[in-house]
Amino acid sequence: MSDPEGKQPHNISAMVKAGQLWRKIEKGAREFYVAPYRQSFARAQRDEDDLFMLMVFSESLGVPNPATYYTMELLPVVYDRFHEWHHRMGMEKSPLDHISCC
């Protein structure tokens, strides 16, 4: 008769290999289905970020914003990305007097 304790390390090793194989298959399948849409997702994310930046800086740009009190708290967080944003929006120089990034 075979000893079940003798087979246990072999079974664990096979389970580990099967788990690794399954992760590789899962990663490949996810890449197969996500890859065609990656650019669309990135563009949608950029558009949402641009709208968010516009909402945060709207009062500074002269557009009335009823949520100015709340968005003012976010200004220090978005200052780092302001330069990229105003170039992406087609503005060569900063449109705000108090932010001179160029």
Image (cartoon, rainbow, N blue to C red):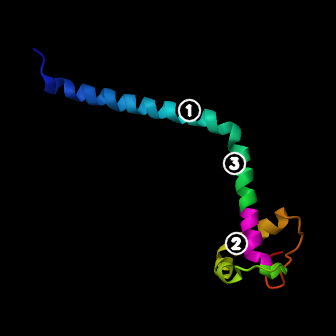
Eyeballing the image, is 102 above or below 39?
below
> Separation of disc 2 and disc 1 at Cα?
36 Å
Q: Quadrant of residue 10?
A: top left
Q: Quadrant of residue 18?
A: top left
Task: Confirm or deny contact between disc 3 and disc 1 (CB under 8 A).
Answer: no
Residue 95: which disc? none
Residue 41: which disc? 3
Estimate the x, y position of residue 55 in percent, counting from the top left: 74, 72
Which amino acid, mark 3? Answer: Phe
Q: Which residue is mark 2?
A: 80
> Separation of disc 3 and disc 1 at Cα?
19 Å
Residue 28: which disc? 1
Q: Nearer the viewer, residue 88 or 73?
A: 73
Estimate the x, y position of residue 16 in percent, counting from the top left: 34, 32
Q: Is residue 9 left or right of residue 5?
A: right
Residue appearing at x 84%, y 75% in the figure: 102
Q: Secondary structure at mark 2?
A: helix
Q: Secondary structure at mark 3?
A: helix
Within the magenta stretch, is there residue 50? yes
Estimate the x, y position of residue 32 in percent, counting from the top left: 62, 32
